């Protein structure tokens, strides 16, 4: 093989095609965009501001009693980071179409490049979901969100500008206290019967959908997804999808199947018995989690090089990289439910 501008153009087109095909194949099976709002970034760090929803209509009698709201805001800072991987081939490896490393045992260089491209395309598509589970959900009990408390907490301020407004919990665990439901297990160990599991899930949903916002009125939250691991695949389907449970004349109508909650099973989630209830949200308004795009993943190119420039190179390095960030969003849009 002779390294020419034509060869370089053909090689890079093939690599780009393989990258894109692997990306598309992987992306079709991912679930991260149901829980992460995508933001576009134009600099190293971005500040996102949200007005505190404290304004509302009030009675003013027959006039002369106008009220004015002090509008407060909270913000979230997200810093972008580089991520990616490089492909390096020497001129000899390309011309001989044989990898030089003893570990690769003379593998054809073009096969090596194609395999690398498939892995990179798949990895890039998967990166937001990997960030969601390994960087955010995994650390949600200890890392703080924009309100200064751990993202999954029993003490989120309802209004960050007014401590007297009280708190709410997006961590359901322990004992039931008043309207707070505590742990709401649906697993077969802590909720041995489907009836118990249904009751527990109904309690969790009732608490979430009754929460009030800074304006003192209900947030009108609607639980949209139940996110769980493989251990709850069967149970979540039974609870959310079947129309009846039980046997014979004692069959019970599954009212929860009318709630419209979709089960989402993620193999990345491996905490037994733990599940998450995520609420409906409008894209662009800030979801439970944020994925920020500064630079999409792309591959550098040598297509602009001439024959002379190519001949002076002993190796070629293709860099596949992007720049992005991931962060916690609104804590009232996702709830961690513990089995105990």
Image (cartoon, rainbow, N blue to C red):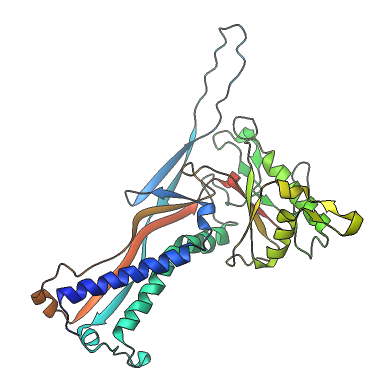
The total of numbered circles placed on residues is 0
Q: Residue at x 34, y 82 (%)?
A: 112
Is residue 219 depicted above or below 41 in this figure?
above
Q: Quadrant of the C terminus?
A: bottom right
Q: Is residue 312 visible?
A: no
Image position, residue 250 (x, y; %): 90, 55
Q: Nearer the viewer, residue 105 or 55?
A: 105
Q: Nearer the viewer, residue 209 or 8?
A: 8
Image position, residue 282 (x, y; %): 52, 42
Q: Is residue 162 left or right of residue 191?
A: left
Q: Is residue 171 left or right of residue 252?
A: left
Q: Name the residue at the right extreme.
A: 249
Q: Name the residue at the left extreme.
A: 308
Q: Residue at x 66, y 50 (%)?
A: 261
Q: Nearer the viewer, residue 104 or 7?
A: 7
Q: Residue at x 71, y 55 (%)?
A: 241
Q: Residue at x 62, y 15 (%)?
A: 59
Q: Is residue 306 visible?
A: yes
The image quadrant that residue 23 belongs to is bottom left
Is residue 154 depicted above or below 51 in this figure?
below
Q: Quadrant of the N terminus?
A: bottom left
Q: Is residue 247 left or right of residue 287?
A: right
The image quadrant that residue 67 belongs to is top right
Image position, residue 258 (x, y; %): 72, 46
Image position, residue 313 (x, y; %): 15, 79
């Amino acid at each position: 093989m002779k390294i020419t501008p034509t060869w370089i153009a053909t090689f890079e087109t093939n690599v780009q095609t393989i990258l894109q095909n692997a990306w598309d194949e992987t992306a079709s099976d991912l679930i991260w965009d149901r829980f992460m709002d995508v933001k576009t970034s134009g600099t190293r760090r971005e500040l996102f501001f949200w007005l505190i929803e404290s304004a509302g209509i009030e009675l003013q009698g027959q006039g002369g009693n106008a009220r004015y709201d002090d509008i407060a805001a909270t913000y979230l800072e997200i810093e972008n980071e580089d991520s990616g991987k490089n492909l390096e081939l020497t001129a000899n490896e390309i011309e001989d179409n044989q990898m030089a490393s003893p570990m690769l045992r003379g593998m054809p260089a073009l096969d090596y490049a194609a395999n690398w491209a498939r892995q990179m395309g798949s990895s890039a598509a998967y990166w937001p979901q990997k960030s969601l589970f390994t960087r955010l959900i995994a650390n949600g009990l200890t890392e703080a969100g924009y309100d200064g408390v751990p993202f999954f907490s029993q003490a989120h301020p309802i209004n960050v500008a007014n401590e007297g407004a009280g708190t709410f919990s997006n961590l359901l665990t322990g004992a039931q206290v008043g309207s707070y439901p505590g742990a709401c297990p649906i697993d077969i160990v802590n909720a041995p019967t489907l009836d118990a599991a249904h009751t527990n899930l109904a309690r969790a949903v009732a608490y979430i959908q009754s929460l009030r916002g800074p304006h003192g009125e209900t947030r009108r939250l609607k639980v949209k997804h139940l996110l769980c691991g493989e251990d709850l695949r069967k149970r979540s389907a039974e609870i959310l999808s079947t129309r009846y449970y039980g046997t014979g004349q004692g069959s019970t109508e599954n009212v929860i199947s009318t709630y419209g909650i979709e089960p989402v099973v993620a193999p990345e989630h491996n905490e037994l018995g733990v599940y998450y209830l995520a609420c409906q949200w409008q894209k662009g308004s800030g979801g439970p989690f944020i994925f920020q795009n500064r630079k999409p993943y792309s591959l550098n190119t040598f297509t602009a090089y001439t024959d002379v420039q190519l001949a002076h190179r002993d190796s070629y390095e293709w860099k596949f990289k992007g720049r992005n960030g991931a962060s916690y969003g609104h804590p009232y849009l996702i709830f961690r439910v513990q089995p105990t």
